[in-house]
Amino acid sequence: MRILFFSSHRYDEDSFRASLARGGHSFDLVFQRAHLDAQTAPLAAGFEVVCPFVNDALNADVLTALAAGGTRLIALRSAGFNHVDLSAAQRLGLTVVRVPAYSPHAVAEHAVGMILTLNRRLHRACNRTREGDFSLDGLLGFDLAGKTVGVVGTGQIGQVFARIMAGFGCQLLAFDPFPQASLTALGVRYVPLPELLAQADIVSLHCPLTADTHHLIDASALASMKTGAMLINTSRGGLVDSPALIDALKTGQLGHLGLDVYEEEADLFFEDRSADVLQDDVLARLLSFPNVIVTAHQAFFTREALAGIADTTLANVAAWAAGAPVNVVKA
């Protein structure tokens, strides 16, 4: 069985070929650097299985073209599936599977790394010392111990994040429709979102992007946060109203911002754009703030996570081929 990978990089090829050997699968893997969209969908003609990534377009037009070319399985190599028109997939008879979890430690630890970097101004300190500036002015941080951290979404990643922050001696608040008893036993207190935003010194987002969570953090939510609070988003860009962040940063209402995801990232992230003029004015403005750090959807990027993604993706394909699909996403 042939599998076509879109938006692939060398690290994808390396991790999937290693997984192929580990799992003893006999699939023929074909890697394509191009993003999946209406123009590139014909490249999948003759492939029963297509393996897209988070920023590939899987709207009705693309899915129709894939189905016309003989594709029957969309094997997402990601947990998120908000970029897939599931109703169209169902109508076209396409099965969609995903990787529901892969090394939650990877994303949780990246979020913690952002907190430490922003708080202790590590990014600025490194730049200074390279220029021979060994002064400490402007690098003052705060103790994490005793601070209140709000965790929005306590799935696997949110749970790992909460446990790490508990280790720093933080007080933990959480918001999630489905409270986790293990976190409650740890001392995490579940509260409504407005209460969490009003009390937290640090807010970290770990929830999926749905119609209900789109722009969960908007101008109103930012205004309700503690003055000078820190916001971290390693989940999905659409959770945050990006232009509203600029106003909150300019007034000082938002004291620190760490983004690993961005709502308009699809045409930017995962590629080297250093020789280009950045056309996204919102992102360009965010990057100009000294109290903002942006990483390019890097939080998942560990050896363990890549291995987990590859193993689960190929296992999903094998299960589907055997007539017993798992990790299916339905409309």
Image (cartoon, helix red, strand yellow):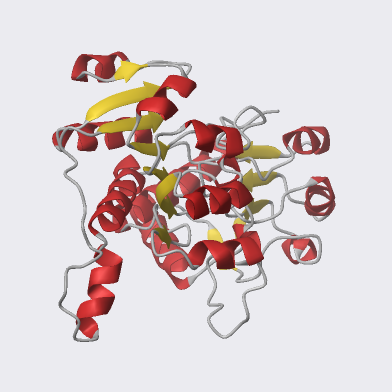
Left/right of residue 226 with respect to residue 243 in the rendered view: left
Q: Can see residue 234? A: no
Left/right of residue 318 with respect to residue 229 in the rendered view: right
Residue in the image at 32% along x and 36% along y: 201
Residue in the image at 21% along x and 57% along y: 140
* x and y, in percent, of residue 296 in the image: 47, 62
Quarter holding residue 283: bottom right
* x and y, in percent, of residue 39 in the image: 81, 66
Residue in the image at 56% along x and 54% along y: 246
Left/right of residue 28 with respect to residue 23 in the rendered view: right
* x and y, in percent, of residue 10 in the image: 46, 72
* x and y, in percent, of residue 264 in the image: 64, 56
Q: Which of 194 and 280 is in front in this view?
A: 194
Q: Can see residue 98? A: yes
Q: Determine whether 224 is above or below 116 in the image.
A: above
Q: Which of 231 and 51 is in front in this view?
A: 231
Q: Determine whether 190 is above or below 123 in the image.
A: above
Q: In which quarter of the image is the C terminus?
A: top right
Q: Determine whether 28 is above or below 182 in the image.
A: below
Residue in the image at 62% along x and 51% along y: 243
Q: Nearer the viewer, residue 164 or 26?
A: 164
Number of marks drawn = 0
Q: Nearer the viewer, residue 137 or 49?
A: 137
Q: In which quarter of the image is the N terminus?
A: bottom right
